[in-house]
Image (cartoon, grey):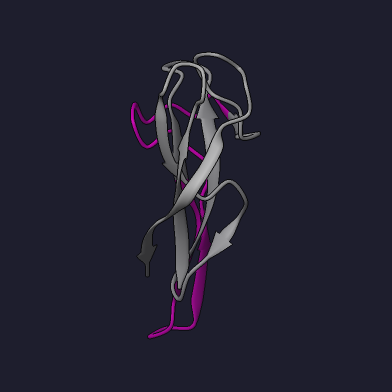
Amino acid sequence: MGTSHRYECAKCKKQVIASLTETEGMSSRVLAVKCNDCGEVSDSVIEQHFDWNDETVKNEPICEECRSKNVVRWDGKCPKCNVIMVNKGMEMLWD
């Protein structure tokens, strides 16, 4: 099972739900990315596994908010304030 956590900025109170590191579930692997276009943080599906045909598909990271490919690996900093966000705990199990 993959996990996503809720992060909160102590300065501006912005919240982000993401994995922070590459996380793998049963059928996909995600990477938390920050979009250089819209400024949002999201988990991007970078790999999908299809057991029924034993296939793995690799995807280019994209912003799940605006679909831009202009993304970088998220470093845990608030996209608004640029301070390290506080992990408030697991938000969801997926896959």
Q: Residue furthest front?
A: 10
Residue 73, image x and y in percent?
A: 63, 36
Frontmost residue, 71 versus 54: 71
Q: Residue at x 43, y 83 (%)?
A: 51
Q: Residue at x 49, y 14 (%)?
A: 80
Is 88 situated above or below 90? above
The quadrant of the image that shows the C terminus is bottom left
Frontmost residue, 32 versus 85: 85
Residue 49, image x and y in percent?
A: 47, 72
Could you say which quadrant of the image residue 93 lies in? bottom left
Is 61 situated above or below 28? above
Is 56 situated above or below 44? below
Residue 28, image x and y in percent?
A: 46, 65
Labels in figure, total: 0
Assess whether residue 8 is covered by the magenta stretch.
no
Residue 1, image x and y in percent?
A: 45, 73
Could you say which quadrant of the image residue 22 lies in? bottom right
- The part of the chain drawn in magenta is 44-71
Q: Residue at x 50, y 63 (%)?
A: 57
Is 93 situated above or below 60? below
Assess whether residue 56 is covered by the magenta stretch.
yes
